[in-house]
Image (cartoon, rainbow, N blue to C red):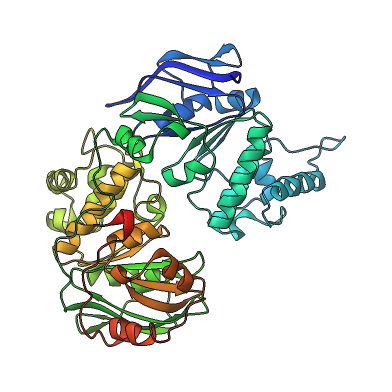
Amino acid sequence: MAEVLLHVEHVSKSFPGVQALDAVSFELRRGEVHALVGENGAGKSTLMKILSGVYRPDGGRIVYKGREVRFQNARESAEAGIGIIYQELNLVPHLSVAQNIYLGREPRSLLGYIDDRKMNVDAARILRELNVDIDPAVRLNKLSISKQQMVEIAKALSKDSEVLIMDEPTSALTETEIDELFKVIHKLRSRGVGIIYISHRLDELKHIVDRITVFRDGRYISTSDYASIGMEEIINKMVGRKLENLFPERRNLPTERKLLEVRNIVHGTVLKGISFDLYEGEILGIAGLMGAGRSELARAVFGADPRDSGDIIREGRKLDIRSPSDAIRNGIAYLSENRKEEGLAVKMRLDQNVTMANLGEVSRRFGIISGARELEATRTYVEELDIRTPSLLQVINNLSGGNQQKVVIAKWLFRDSRILIFDEPTRGIDVGAKYAIYELIERLAREGVGVILISSELPEILGMTDRVLVLHEGSLTATLRTADTSQEEILNYAAGLGSLGAHGASAALAASASGAGAPGRNAAPGASAR
């Protein structure tokens, strides 16, 4: 049996109103990849912050390389050989890639000056190991989010850590970048590095994981060899109950009434004349590879990005949408994939976030906000959406990712929006919370709301939607009925390999342009069957 690098024994940690960890235990061996899984709020990130010196435990002990440790800060943990890659980027946008990788550890010349040349050379070497084509001298904010994530990974690798914690490292990566990351993980494992791997993408664990530990509600549940446990058992342990289906059963058909018509939207070379319809009670998927224009299309409809041309029509009336406030007034809401920066005020309270898009409803004369009305409205949605919070006055940043997403939904429901655009609604959310979000989306459609669902997870698209728009490099390549398509067909069109021939032009025109006939109800294929 390999040497035990790290042993966590009965560690506890509480915050006001929340017992984040309740006497949990965990063990990491040298040269293994050990997955730590659990729903949002299970305590995974809290334990990782204790191991990396950000938090100090209330009780229990941590033994690292045979010696009990109690890190007072992040520097002590890093100097001991424990590196961490956070889910949320911890980088400085105005500095170069190399400066970010070696921030606080810059190589210096004999005279004590920062040696930029050596720093760039060393950074280039690490980036080559990741097989990533990034200029170490380029400023970070010039890079895409996925490339910034690779810089975060490179920063952790540059420290030659013996223990490496990866918290959702693939959440913003392309499939190619994920493959390269897995190659690096295998290489590190062969060198004897112990890796703690946290991910809500359970299907990716089979490629890299040796053992798996499950936490639930701040408690330790079990540890197993990954080869000896099935996915269904893992999910059951995580949620504490058996999930019969990955997606909820749909209980209604979309009507023939068009809620939204989008015609020939153009934005530079990003959007090239895209048209589609959205029906009452429909869940319309948008699929495509990174850079296809999915989010850009949503932002153009919402008024967050400008349009060079094109029309947006709401129930027969042409809208003049030049800003998000115009869209909001017309009942269109956009739930951004970056909920913390664009969907929430994370340092404000729960009640303030729920009501911020409709302050007139909770204000008295002269625009003075009524705290009592805010709490009354918030209580309604906390109960209706099952938002888990110790208080209606809780600061948003203290809620789990799944509950934060529910707060964003509550904000737009309080505004009485009839068209909701969900952009990666379950990114960074565990399987149990995902199902709760899916149920909310299905319920909204059942109540006549038109839903646009953008997702990079094709099982989610196939399991939740009625029709799918497939984009490739800013163009609409296909409009498909979900019941009649497959992952392979969607990927074919997403890669630009399909053509709008017999299958395409007539179907796309019928479903997207002429609107002849409302979309039929789908049944998700295979294991995702409804």
Quadrant assignment, res 31: top right
Residue depicted at 54% across the width and 56% down the height:
175
Residue depicted at 19% across the width and 63% down the height:
445
Q: Residue 40: in sight, yes or no?
A: no
Q: Is residue 462 left or right of residue 147?
A: left
Residue 149 image offset from top left, x and y in percent: 56, 49
Reply above or below: 372 against 321.
Answer: above
Residue depicted at 27% across the width and 48% down the height:
435
In-front residue for pair 347/99:
99
Q: Residue furthest right?
A: 110
Reply above or below: 162 against 297.
Answer: above
What number of labels is visible?
Answer: 0
Residue 150 image offset from top left, x and y in percent: 60, 49
Please identify the quadrant where the N terminus is shown.
top right
In-front residue for pair 225/393:
225
In-front residue for pair 55/289:
289
Residue 387 image offset from top left, x and y in percent: 22, 42
Reply above or below: 133 against 225.
Answer: below
Residue 268 image offset from top left, x and y in percent: 51, 79
Q: Is residue 292 left or right of residue 124?
A: left
Q: Residue 320: in sight, yes or no?
A: yes
Residue depicted at 56% across the width and 51% down the height:
178
Reply above or below: 310 against 246.
Answer: below
Please identify the quadrant where the C terminus is shown.
bottom left
